[in-house]
Amino acid sequence: MSTIRKKGIITTVFIYAGFLLGALNTYLYAKYFQPDQTGLTRVLLDIAVLSSSFALLGTNSIVVKFFPYYKNFHKENKSELVTISFVLSLIGCLIVFLSFSTFMKPFIIKKFIGKAPLLVEYFYLVFPLMLFLTLFQVLEAQTWTIQKGHVANLLKEVLFRGMNTILNLLFIGGVLTFPLYADLFSFQYFAIFAALIIYLLCIRQLKMSFQISKLTKRLWKRMVPYALFVLGSNVISLMSTTMDGIIISSLMGLSFTSVFINTQYISNFIVVPYRAALSMAAGPISQAWKDRDILKLDRIYKKTSLNLLIVSSFIFAMIMLNWDDLLDWVKPDPIYHLGKPVMFYLGLYQVIELGTGMNSAIILTSRRWKFELYSNIILLLLTLPLTYFLIKHMGMIGAALATLISRTIFNFIRYVFLYKVYNLQPFTKKTILAVLIPIVVYLPVAYTIHLQDPLMGLIVRSTVFTAVYTLLLLQLRVSEDVMQVFGTVKKRVGKLINR
């Protein structure tokens, strides 16, 4: 676990650096772009991500699940696994492109021409976004298997958003017209895909074979149904998380989509630790299943659940504490003030999601991986009608509330499944403390600290909350990993002081 923790911390730093750039981009979008232009960029990315989940055909999950077998079979670290994944993904991209270009085109025009004409005009940009995101995700899966997931995260979180920042500044400065800006925006994934290829070639970890081995001939009957089930699961899962923005665009327009998706982006700060932990833990979880090491799985499950709950609760509380002061300080378009209740429901859902730990990764790499699809079908059946109904009656708040309700039920179902089938569950006695501490600290800070200057209010409130929260965590020894990280930091600070 120490290796996972160290690389997880590195990955978290990279992801948060990217999120800081993302926060800057969110500010630039809110301050200098028209709300419908901002909404366009967000919806294009949502559609590209959803389309990419189709185009991948489940190949990235095949790379992660079956890598241990190929690693043992090909001693020279040269296999056809990534080659097959690339070929299938390109076929998937072609299928999606043909679908959008033919029978789906009239439907898209009909649904969006009234409330979101800008989306219809620039819809062609989905295709380069989808293509290079798909190819990047194949290589990203390869980095997970060789414990280099932090590099993919550096490119995806920092380089991608850094390029976005540069484009935004060029547009704001008048160097780029919006049509040229939009075209360049659609090729950002190409840059990080090319960078990842160069990195893997430099460390000699992209040794692709174009011959089908005996191992593939033996495993393909397991790989194909696994890929199809993962494809269905991923598509359904992404539909449940991206359709809200698309439905808002159709029913309310791109301006409200901009508010919802920017608020959703801020709520995604809470998810950063999970993404870091997943990139580091996916390989060990897959290996533990291969070795049938249930005790190791139990340790990973419990530790990730507790640590993710601690960090996500902290981030959620910080966002809610400072929401009003942050908007008063930034002074964006007044429409963005409508996002606070949306943030509350989305943030609460993220905390619940992270509090259940690595349940998705554990299910996907187990022999009962088909349940991932079944549970995601239930999620979709809950999400789509609930989202549509609540958006029509409550607007953006309805979309966030639908997400909270459906994802809570979804996570409860998966929790029960892992407990009943494998006797695995993520909670310990320390979980109660991890839930109570942020609530106990949040309430007095939120209701007692009010300053006239929004920036000073933000700084003082954040400082007090962080200090009290950290003190209670350490005094009550809630997490072994938190204690070890604190001990390491304390030693290094001590060495610097004594020099």
Image (tube, rainbow, N blue to C red):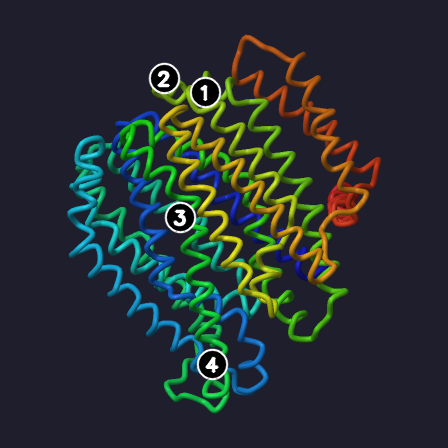
Tell me which numbered mark, 4 or 2, is placed earlier along the sequence.
4
Q: Earlier in the sequence, mark 1 or mark 2?
A: 1
The label number, if any, that marks residue 248 in the structure image: none
Q: Residue sitting at 61 percent across and 38 percent down?
A: 351
Q: Residues within 10 Å of mark 1 (few under 14, many from 20)?
A: some
Q: In the figure, is residue 314 to the left or right of 67?
A: right
Q: Which residue is mark 4?
A: 221
Give the Cα separation between the discs numbered 1 and 2. Answer: 9 Å
Total marks shown come to 4
Which of pointers 1 and 2 indicates the residue nearer the eye?
2
Which residue is more in the foreground, 130 or 164?
130
3D distance between C-alphas at marks 2 and 3: 30 Å
Circle nearer the viewer, 1 or 4:
4
Judged by depth in the image, the label closer to the viewer, 4 or 2, is 4
Indicate the secondary structure of the residue bearing disc 1.
Answer: helix
In the structure shown, which secondary structural element does the residue marked by tag 3 occupy?
Answer: helix
Distance CA(mark 3)–CA(mark 4): 28 Å
Please state which of residues 220 and 314 is positioned toward the viewer in this rendering: 220
Amino acid type at mark 1: Leu
| Residue 261 point in image, percent of width and height | 39, 35
Which of the two discs, 2 and 3, labels the residue nearer the N terminus?
A: 3
Reading the chain from its start, which is encountered first: label 1 or label 3? 3
Q: Which mark is residue 327?
A: 1
- Name which quarter of the figure residue 442 lies in: top right
In the picture, the disc for residue 334 is: 2
Q: Earlier in the sequence, mark 1 or mark 4?
A: 4
Tell me how far mark 4 sits from mark 2, CA to CA: 56 Å
